[in-house]
Image (cartoon, rainbow, N blue to C red):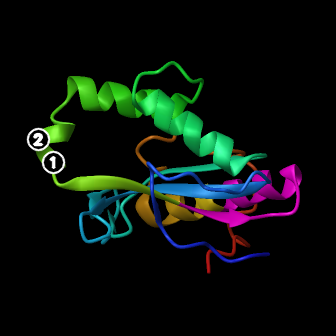
Amino acid sequence: MSKWNEWIDLEKNASYKECGVYKIRLANLKDCPIEISRFLDKDKDGIIQIGNSKDIEKRIKCFRSAMEGKGCAHAEGKRLNLIKKYTNFIGRYNNCKIQYSFKKLRNESETKKEEERLLKCYFKRHGEVPPLNNNLPKKYIIDWETLNCD
């Protein structure tokens, strides 16, 4: 399995058109993550979404378009668009930017398993999934005790 790449500003394309998982975060203008209060613990990494894709570049572009209200079918991007429009997001996070990081994987099956692991580990630590994610996949399957979150 590959390692996570460096954090990239959302405006820049991924230049990776294969399978992988990705994280989207809030960061300040110095590229440091912005801490987000969660149910059980503060998320010092500022993660607002965890996802997977068969084409990382296309998926990040779609998130960006949906976030900007341009109609791409990305539920989390659309949710962020609503948050930006109808809440105090801009006032609260005025001096921030959105960044992403991804990890290359071999195939679609591997990406789904890794996304599930990442979401469950996030849930285990914070008591909920990242703010833009809707669901915790396979939450009732009994594998929590053996879950490797390192």
Q: Which residue is mark 2?
A: 91
Q: Is residue 104 magenta?
A: yes
Residue 62 seen in the current view:
yes
- Judging from the image, what secondary structure is the residue with disc 2 in? helix
Which residue does the image show at 75% across and 62% down from the upper left? 143
Image check: 9 left or right of 72? left
Q: Is residue 135 visible?
A: no
Instruction: Name, please, the residue furthest toward the left.
Output: 91
Q: Is residue 107 left or right of residue 4?
A: right
Type of amino acid under label 2: Gly
Question: What residue appears at the point 48 percent right and 28 percent down from the top-left corner?
Answer: 66
Secondary structure beneath dot 1 equals loop
Residue 11 or 39: which is nearer the viewer?
11
Residue type for callout 1: Asn
**Which contiguous range is marked in magenta?**
101-117
Query: What is the C-alpha distance between the residues marked 1 and 2?
Result: 5 Å
Label number found at residue 94:
1
> In this picture, is 135 found above or below 31?
above
Q: Position of residue 146 (x, y in %)?
A: 73, 73
Q: Nearer the viewer, residue 21 or 41?
A: 21
Kindly indicate whether the residue at mark 2 contacts the one at mark 1 (C-beta within 8 angstroms): yes
Write down the quadrant of residue 20 in the picture: bottom right
Residue 17, magenta (yes or no): no
Give the left or right position of residue 145, taking residue 12 as reference. right
Task: Tell me: residue 96, above or below residue 41.
Answer: above
> Looking at the image, which residue sits at the far bottom?
150
The part of the image, by quadrant, that contains residue 145 is bottom right
- Horizontal and vertical percent for residue 124? 52, 63
Residue 51 on image: x %, y %: 62, 48
